[in-house]
Amino acid sequence: MERARVAPSPVRVWISATRPKTLTAGLAPVAAATGLATAQGVFAGDAVAASLMCVVFLQIATNLANDYFDFVKGADTAERVGPTRATQSELLSPTAVFLGMSVCLVLAAGAGGYLAGAAGWPMFALGAVCLACAVGYTGGPRPLAYHGLGDLFVLVFFGPVATAGTYYVQTQVLSADAILAGVGLGAFSTAILTVNNLRDRETDAAAGKRTLAVRFGDRFAAYEYMACLLVALLTPVVGLAFLGWSPWLFICVFGVVSCRRPASIVAAYAKPGADAGELDRRALNPVLGMTARCVLMYGLLLAIGFMSAVLWG
């Protein structure tokens, strides 16, 4: 006799809808920037807490907006091979997801307002742009993700903007070190999105979602993933050559090296014939989580590297 399916609890459904495995993309730049500021003798605990709150709720709002708008636009259907989406699977109503997105935007705006009060109008302007992009990523008349601009959004906002912004609210100074660290982090976070777009290429194409994977194919997406890892790998090299970074910063390379296994899975899509659908895209589901964990490791190791350079030279 077949067991009746037990519906997941509302709490578990909401946690899943936030896509917790991907939240490391927002945590990593805050960690790296805080490590850099601490190494320079500055640590503002309230600013760090507000920055964490801001980036996490902005990312959750973006994820919920993606869940809602992709369902409304027909990109999320029963044919998709990725993890269950709350709206598409009817675990949550579209109205509930839209309200959840709105609440997260308000919470992010509240944290951003605190940062703007502490760091001045540049943070207010930056916060307004971030809020608009969180919705405009998949919503609005010309959503970024539907026109191949999602990768650029992640590269910029989860990279230099989040890293340099977190550093700025603690020090009131723009830093080339923070911007460069942000480039590496942004590239690494873009690798997470690349896996998502590679996995969903066929269903995205059917829905008119013109991601870079849809526009240029599986092989391009696989090479893009590798290029993102290469940028993260070369970041401390550039820092050493042009900004006088300490060799201690090379510790972050372990974050990239730890991505060997997911990279080997993605590499299969770089082979001729991959676009013909020979590979099971479900194999990419764990790759997303593995890459996200490596991004967090990379950010934490950057923070440790900055502080180690001061402590031990």
Image (tube, rainbow, N blue to C red):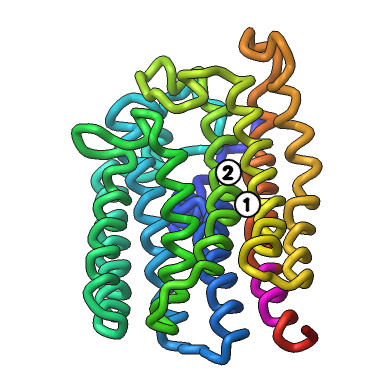
Label disc, if present, on residue 168 of the rendered structure: none
Kindly indicate the quadrant of the structure image that contains residue 121: bottom left
Q: Residue lying farthest left?
A: 141
Q: Nearer the viewer, residue 155 or 81?
A: 155
Q: Residue furthest bottom?
A: 41
Identify which residue is drawn at 69% across, 61% down: 241
How far across and down, in percent of the image, does residue 272 sit? 72, 11
- Rendered image: mark on residue 292: 1
Label 2 sits on what residue type?
Ile
How many numbered marks are there? 2
Q: Secondary structure at mark 2?
A: helix
Amino acid on which the number 1 mark rests in the picture: Ala
Q: Position of residue 300 (x, y in %)?
A: 66, 69
Label 1: state its secondary structure: helix
Using the image as rendered, state which of residue 128 and residue 208 is in the foreground. Answer: 128
| Viewer-closest of 171 and 272 | 171
Report the side of 103 relative to 254 (left or right): left
Q: Which residue is mark 2?
A: 192
Provide the residue span drawn in magenta.
302-307
Q: Where residue 106 sits: x, y (%)?
A: 25, 66
- Marks 1 and 2: CB-CB under 8 Å? yes
Residue occupying image coordinates x 57% and y 64%: 28
Q: Main secondary structure of the magenta part?
A: helix
Please report the residue visible at 38 percent of the width from the left and 82 percent of the height from the top.
172
